Image (cartoon, rainbow, N blue to C red):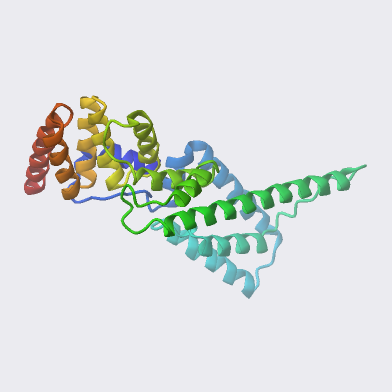
């Protein structure tokens, strides 16, 4: 969500000192607010409040202070970077939060409460295990497809086996966006299957608006005759990725081959490149 908003606001903000994909606010609070809104912040602060309130029951020892210090370092780090996006930081935080937790929840005693609680916990653990197994299987398929595709990622370099693996991963919710990202790199800008290509690239652009996907979106929109949308997409791409030389060359080639669809976009692209250059010069 953060990277998508940053990409869309590029032409409006016109920050020439920033280029590329900014997919994280580098601040846990702001990032959570961007991703989950007020509900996410309430969940975070409520959980932390309950955890901190439970600490009143303990008498801190040297081990406690060491744990608090380590969590404090992670908290400070999370306000200027994003360590908790990496499992080797997240695992440390989770273990320390659990080890230092003093809330002492327990199930209400009553007839059948222990049995019901154990069954419920067993169902949760079984579901989590099934999700992990599916995730591992999907990851192995994705890894196999990418390592067998070749480095270039151009159309025609993917084997039928790799295409089948990507299609299988696409049906698995947790990694489907990554499979589509790989599939979008194989798109050729032409009229064949244009509707499906545009739909796929649009989803990938919303997932991660990287340079190749952003410029390809403009080309596909121009191919489909949506000139205004194509111009907006190209302008957004220029302000995030101003050094798109290969994409400009591709547009020139397409305009020469199919001027009806691409000549107007090429003229617009040249105009916006000049505007960007003037903005850089004036700052």
Q: Is residue 41 left or right of residue 20?
A: right
Please state the horizontal and vertical placement of residue 76, each as a whole percent of the image.
44, 60
Vertical placement of residue 79 versus 69, above or below: above
Please state the horizontal and vertical placement of residue 3, each as a whole percent of the image.
35, 44
Q: Quadrant of residue 248?
A: top left
Q: Is residue 142 left or right of residue 231?
A: right
Identity of the residue furthest to the bottom in this view: 62
Please give the name of the residue rendered at 63% of the width and 69% of the height, measured from the top-left corner: 64
Vertical placement of residue 173 versus 129, above or below: above
Q: Nearer the viewer, residue 265 or 39?
A: 265
Whether residue 12 is visible to the viewer of this picture, yes or no, is no
Q: Is residue 179 left or right of residue 137?
A: left
Please give the name of the residue rendered at 34% of the width and 59% of the height, measured from the top-left corner: 151
Q: Quadrant of residue 196?
A: top left
Q: Nearer the viewer, residue 2 or 101?
A: 2
Please state the horizontal and vertical placement of residue 216, each as a whole percent of the image.
27, 40
Identity of the residue furthest to the right in this view: 111
């Amino acid at each position: 969500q953060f990277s998508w908003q940053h990409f869309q606001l590029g032409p409006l903000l016109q920050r020439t000192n920033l280029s590329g994909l900014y997919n994280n606010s580098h601040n846990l609070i702001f990032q959570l607010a961007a991703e989950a809104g007020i509900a996410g912040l309430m969940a975070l602060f409520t959980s932390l409040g309950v955890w901190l309130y439970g600490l009143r029951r303990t008498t801190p020892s040297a081990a406690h202070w060491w744990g608090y210090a380590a969590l404090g370092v992670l908290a400070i780090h999370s306000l200027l970077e994003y360590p908790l996006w990496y499992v080797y930081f997240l695992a440390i935080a989770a273990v320390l939060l659990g080890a230092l937790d003093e809330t002492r929840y327990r199930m209400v005693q009553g007839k059948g409460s222990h049995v019901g609680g154990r069954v419920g916990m067993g169902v949760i653990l079984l579901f989590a295990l099934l999700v992990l197994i599916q995730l591992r299987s999907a990851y192995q398929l994705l890894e196999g497809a990418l390592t067998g595709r070749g480095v270039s990622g151009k159309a025609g370099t993917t084997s039928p086996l790799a295409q089948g693996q990507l299609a299988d991963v696409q049906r698995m919710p947790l990694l489907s966006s990554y499979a589509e990202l790989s599939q979008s790199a194989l798109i050729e800008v032409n009229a064949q299957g244009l509707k499906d290509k545009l739909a796929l690239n649009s989803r990938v652009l919303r997932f991660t608006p990287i340079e190749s996907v952003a410029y390809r979106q403009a080309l596909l929109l121009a191919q489909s005759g949506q000139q205004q949308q194509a111009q907006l997409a190209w302008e957004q791409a220029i302000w995030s990725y101003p050094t798109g030389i290969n994409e400009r060359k591709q547009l020139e080639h397409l305009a020469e081959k199919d001027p009806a669809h691409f000549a107007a976009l090429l003229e617009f692209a040249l105009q916006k490149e000049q505007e960007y250059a003037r903005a850089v010069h004036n700052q």
